[in-house]
Amino acid sequence: MTTAPSDIPARAWAMLILLALVWGTSFLAIRTALDEIAPLTSVLYRVAPAALALWLYVAGRRLPVPRSPRVWGAFLVMGVLNNAVPFSLMAWGQLHITTGLTSILNATTAIWGVLVAALVFSDERLSTRKALGVATGFAGVATAIGWQALADLDAQSLAQAAVILGTLSYAVAGAAGRAWLSDLRPEVAAAGMLTGATIVMAPLAILIEGAPPISLAPDTWLAVGYYALIATACAYLLYWRILALAGAGTLLLVTLLIPPVAITLGATVRGETLDPNAWSGFGLLALGLAILDGRLFRRRPARAV
């Protein structure tokens, strides 16, 4: 059952807004780090410290650590799908498009998630309402990108395609995680996934971009520390608390709260501007997400006089 907005606890609202601020700011932090380090290295610097931080949390809470080779194999695959692939695609994409547009396209994750779940799980039927929401959401994405850009193959259009492919990878990872890791504590699953991503990204980054640089500007280290420890490790913990407190439907709202944060910071700190199409596309995408959520269109029971 989906919680109505007025029924969401004040504490959940506060955590939801905090999560949107944390994740919205991560787009600026990643773009700042990319001024000095290459995309794959930026991902390695994200997943490795976050994995370490979460394993320390797991140890501190004395949570059981799985030993099954099957589970660790799932961690490796999930690390690729949920971290290595989308983080790498989006980091490269941010070299060519603004942080605000990246955050808008990132919201496509929820749209893909509905389609992937409908294909994989028998209890996730694609209803008429969901189909309308998906269609509206994708119309918003096309509008944000620009219909002409869909036919171009320049760096900007390829960067936008990379971000969208990253969101598809997130959606596939979500379905795989439900199928493979649903019996694990989420903290353990996240630590395992990030470990799998680190195992993949370390040799890949070194092979393609060389040894990770150590001598970096303070602003770069600050950005890396933020997106690794705050926007990844701590954000996972905050995400699960909101999920337990208010449910999965409420978490969809964070998708709508992230772009305004990223757009504002991109404009303020980096002087970025968004094409009017991006704003129109975000409006359509937000409408599509609202249709998927469904609660805005649900009749509220009449109050007794």
Image (cartoon, helix red, strand yellow):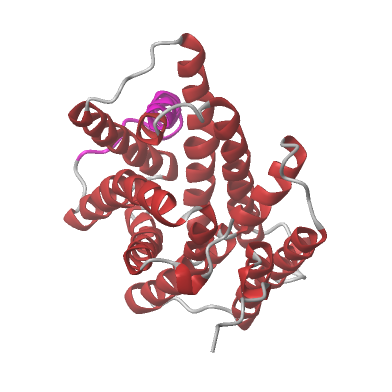
Secondary structure mostly seen in magenta is: helix
Pick the front one: 296 or 69:
296
Q: Is residue 39 above or below residue 31?
A: above
- Residue at 55% over, 66% down: 104
- Can residue 255 be seen at all in this image of the molecule? yes
Q: Position of residue 162 (x, y in %)?
A: 61, 50
Residue interval drawn in magenta: 192-214
Looking at the rendering, in which quadrant would you find the C terminus?
Answer: bottom right
Q: Is residue 128 above or below residue 284?
A: above
Which quadrant is the N terminus positioned in?
bottom right
Residue 63: give x, y in percent of width and height.
28, 25
Q: Position of residue 31 (x, y in %)?
A: 39, 58
Q: Nearer the viewer, residue 132 or 127?
A: 127
Residue 55, quarter of picture:
top left
| Residue 114 part of the magenta-drawn span | no
| Residue 96 appears in the rendering | no
Question: Which residue is pictured at 67% across the width and 59% down the height?
Answer: 154
Q: Residue furthest bottom?
A: 305
Q: Residue at x 61, y 62 (%)?
A: 156
Q: Is residue 13 above or below residue 267?
A: above
For the point 45% across and 28% down, the residue is 204
* Front-most of residues 293 and 50: 293
Q: Is residue 67 left or right of residue 84?
A: left
